Amino acid sequence: MKVYARFSRPGDERLRRRLERLAAAPGLDLAPLPPLPRGEEDDATPTLHITRSGLYLTLGAAKLFFHPGMALLRVMRARRGEYDRFLSLADVRSGDTVLDATAGLGADALVAAWAVGERGRVVGTECAPLVFALLRDGLENFSTDWPGRGCGAKGESLAELGRAAERVQAHRAEHTEFLRALPDGAVDIVCFDPMFRSTVAEAAAMQALKLWSSPVALGAEAVAEACRVARRRVVLKERRGSGEFARLGFHLPAQGGSKVCYGVIKRD
Ligand SMILES: C[S@@+](CC[C@H](N)C(=O)[O-])C[C@H]1O[C@@H](n2cnc3c(N)ncnc32)[C@H](O)[C@@H]1O
């Protein structure tokens, strides 16, 4: 996929290394942003901005970037002993190996990596090249980009998330192929959070993600492979009332009135 790169600080060694790592990301064709005259801008090719305050991708008004905000909020709540529906229904435990088969920009993967602790790990697969590049860059630079941006419980949670980010191993891979290559019972939990089937009004970040992510529906073969590979749970996140749960054989535990639900297949 062709992407323009806009590099804000040519003399910054850390940013240069970051750019080189991005240029080597699978499936990306990174080219310097050409100096196009006004009115002749290339509005079909996204631009990746590499700046000291972070990395972001733009196309017109759409903007996509790695941000730990949602994971941070969930970890701060979980540290206070509050319930996290994903961690509870997926039955994530300390020391587990979790495969996040639709890693996206890593919020669930980070929360899972925090929950499994130092003895556990999270493997994430993401097939869309640009999303994967942002995810890998965000995870690899988490500890320099984020800790220090908060104090008290927020600062502590960011520091813990920084260590959790190191436990997430991201792969640019299509999940069915990735799962096929794993032995039986290789992980404790496999989770799927594919792009929702039905479209409704969505937040700007989700609209931007839609531009560069894979819209393909979760396949029955991926679920069958996940059931072979998971020792304890296979979990699917979808909209409440989605036919995907029944089509793919997921049981829906009671979970209040939320618009989003988790379907579960127990393997133990
Ligand atoms: C809704 S997002 C996941 C968000 C993620 N759970 C989070 O917390 O940030 C779904 C992601 O799954 C990816 N995806 C869809 N089908 C896939 C497949 N077959 N293999 C790997 N990734 C896939 C999409 O490209 C997209 O980035």
Image (cartoon, helix red, strand yellow):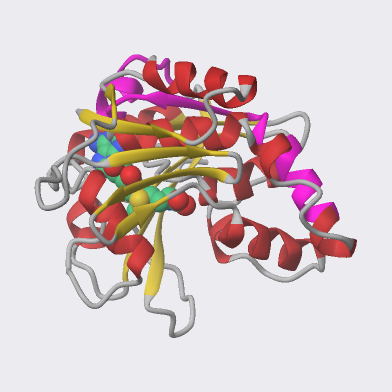
Quarter holding residue 247: bottom left
Vertical side of 8 occupied by 153: above or below: below
Magenta segment includes 35: no
The image shows residue 203 at horizontal and vertical percentages of 35, 71
Quick one: 148 or 72, which is closer to the camera?
148
Q: Residue at x 62, y 19 (%)?
A: 13
The image shows residue 60 at horizontal and vertical percentages of 23, 56
- Give the magenta range: 156-184
Vertical side of 152 occupied by 235: above or below: above
Magenta segment includes 169: yes
Quick one: 254 or 20, which is closer to the camera?
20
Judged from this view, the residue extending furthest toward the right is: 152
The image shows residue 196 at horizontal and vertical percentages of 25, 61
Quick one: 84 or 70, which is closer to the camera?
70
Q: How many marks?
A: 0
Quick one: 172 or 92, which is closer to the camera?
172
Residue 196 horizontal side relative to residue 68, left or right: left
